[in-house]
Amino acid sequence: MTLLFVDSNAALRGTRTIWLRESLPGFTIVDFSEASEAAAWIAKADALDILITEAIFPSRETGFTLRDAARARFPQVRVLFTTRYDLSGFEEQIADGRVLKDGPYTLEKLLERVRPLLTKPLESDETPPVMPPGTVLGNYQVLERLYVEKEAETYRALQIAVQRPVGLVLLKPEYLKQPEVVAKFKERERVKASLMHPRIAPLFEAGEANGWLFYTRELPRGRSLTEIEQTDETLTERRLAEVLHGVAEAMQFATERGYHHRSLAPRDIYIDAEHQASIVNIFRPTADEPRDAKADVRAFLNLLRQVTADGKASGLLKSLADANHDWSGLLIALDDVRDDMRERSIIRKIEAETLPVNVHGNKPWWLWMLVVIILVVVAALGALMNGSNSPMTVKATALPIELVRIPAGTFEYQKNEKITPPEFWISKHEVTIGQYAEFLQALKVAAPGAFDHALQPKTKTSHEPAKWSNYYAAAKAGTTFNGESITLNTPVSQVDWWDAYAFAKWKGQRLPTEKEWEKAARGEKGFRYPWGNQPRNNAANLGDDYNATPKGRGGAIDGYNLWAPITRITQDVSPYGVCDMAGNVSEWTSGESQDGEWPAHPDYIDIKVPVVRGGHFGLKSSDHLLTDRLFPESANEATLARGFRTASSTAPAKPKP
């Protein structure tokens, strides 16, 4: 036998727990100080017989929500509410629970309330169903009972005329002669019938037959969370995000329109084969006491713990729980999570489209032939452009780094913080392939590790990006790579944080801080976009026109499917004249907080990582491009859509004549 004791009174909880252990020797006593901790325990518990909990916690969480979560897993659990508040008006929420006024209470008072719970008969699914399988009620045939509630029983039934499975909710016969209960049941039918959303099971029919009162509703597709909990299945990060988003979408839709509801239970959440989620219609007439949306979200997230895979999925669930969202906030956060996952998918598709190389490292003969033809054509075009006497060569040149002064002054950082960074300089453009090639050339004569960060992993022995020889050769020739034109003035990519740091140090500069990056991008007025507060669909090289298919041609809006050269004319220019902050490639920052350390990854709080800022060619446009903080899995991460720019705290030296 198991008893869960939840009491926020730190001074007395220990003593009261000892009372219970001494007075109930046959029980396992589990105690917590907070409702959230207790809910997390309930989600993984094997058994629970008695719950003693505060009715209303100082945090404004309620024991009623905790009771609902407990009964969702253990329908027979008996409940005692302790309270220091007047619970007048909470009669419906208390239901069949007992109440103990905390004055504070004595051992005798506690045991007086607990003893009846030890002998009280259990109201569980072991009681015979009101409607045995095979019973015909109007146009419906009962198949099996699904679960029992205080005033109603829910069955799986078959609509005979069309052979459609439905959920049939029957008012228990003992309540048919209680007008107030009947009226409440019918009002609940009207509320459910008025709510239409693709992720909320609709009400089909409200009916009366042979003196019985019932209504039928859709049985959502897939399996309930209760059924999934009974298997060994777990949800990966991507699948979990889809499930969470589906439920949040339904709950936000209904609560935003003022619908009241009971607590979600595992039996209410259904997940289909495509991991799309829908919920049973749990909505009902408005109650006197409004629900705590943040507590409801925390309870919902706790329900998913048992079916969440370890690692990224578990980290995602924890980060969402720690953020303390309401339904609207949860939906917005999940939109961001799904966008980030789409970005990762795009990057993987791009990386899969690189030029083919056989396992022995030798290019196929036809590829060499293609490269030769391209080089000859480009050289010939160069000769024609430079005059008939010009040699058949292409002179590839890279622009030098140009630093832009950002004056000291106050600006709006993120969305509501005013800060005043000192004067600094930042590169006008993202670092290019040609500039990075000069760095790699310099490393050949420099002392090993001369520009490396002190914490760079020992296993990292080179700053040459993946497939560097392929796309550097294409850039020098001014041909294409991955189907996109590329030159020495195209931003370098496939660089990790250690590469970016080493390059900046070699240049006698550094990586910009997040605050410097954002000020350079948004200006003193804190614009949403570098060019102002109004969106322009073709101003930045973003992913609204990106096409990931091998034969597809993207770039219909901004002219580029992948990277764009820094030499092009662009509207993606900040008030200070800094280019490509909204798009082209996203950029590493120094990532350092005030204490000089990287911030903790929101999904893995024990891992610290530098932060990436700005959009890129595969990311769709939004008004958060300049404020979103993107967290890589580690500083070792390198993608085709990420580069960097440099910064300095001192003015650049004037060029020699």
Image (cartoon, grey):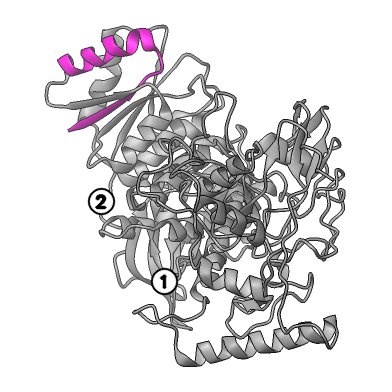
From the viewer's perspective, is 18 left or right of 393? left
- Residue appearing at x 63%, y 38% in the figure: 510
| Residue 398 rendering spot, x and y as whole percentages | 72, 61
Q: Secondary structure beneath disc 2?
A: loop
Q: Which mark is residue 273?
A: 1
Which part of the image, by quadrant, shows the C terminus? top right
| Residue 162 rendering spot, x and y as whole percentages | 48, 83
Mark 2 and mark 1 in contact? Answer it, CB < 8 Å: no
Query: Residue 6 colored magenta?
Result: yes
From the viewer's perspective, is 177 left or right of 306? right
Front position in the image: 97 or 419: 419
Give the vertical position of 207 relative to 176 (above or below).
below
Bounds of the magenta span? 1-22
From the viewer's perspective, is 260 left or right of 277? right
Marks 2 and 1, how far apart in space? 33 Å
Which three-letter amino acid code belongs to the residue tagged 1?
Answer: Ala
- Residue appearing at x 53%, y 63% in the figure: 201
Query: Residue 367 colored magenta?
Result: no
| Residue 381 rendering spot, x and y as whole percentages | 77, 86
Quadrant of res 514: top right
Which three-letter amino acid code belongs to the residue tagged 2?
Answer: Thr
Front position in the image: 190 or 572: 572
Give the vertical position of 497 relative to 231 (above or below).
above
Q: Nearer the viewer, mark 2 or mark 1?
A: 1
| Residue 5 rendering spot, x and y as whole percentages | 31, 24
Give the vertical position of 617 relative to 73 (above or below).
below
Front position in the image: 505 or 168: 505
Q: Earlier in the sequence, mark 2 or mark 1?
A: 2
From the viewer's perspective, is 28 left or right of 85? left
Q: Which residue is mark 2?
A: 127
- Residue appearing at x 78%, y 61% in the figure: 540
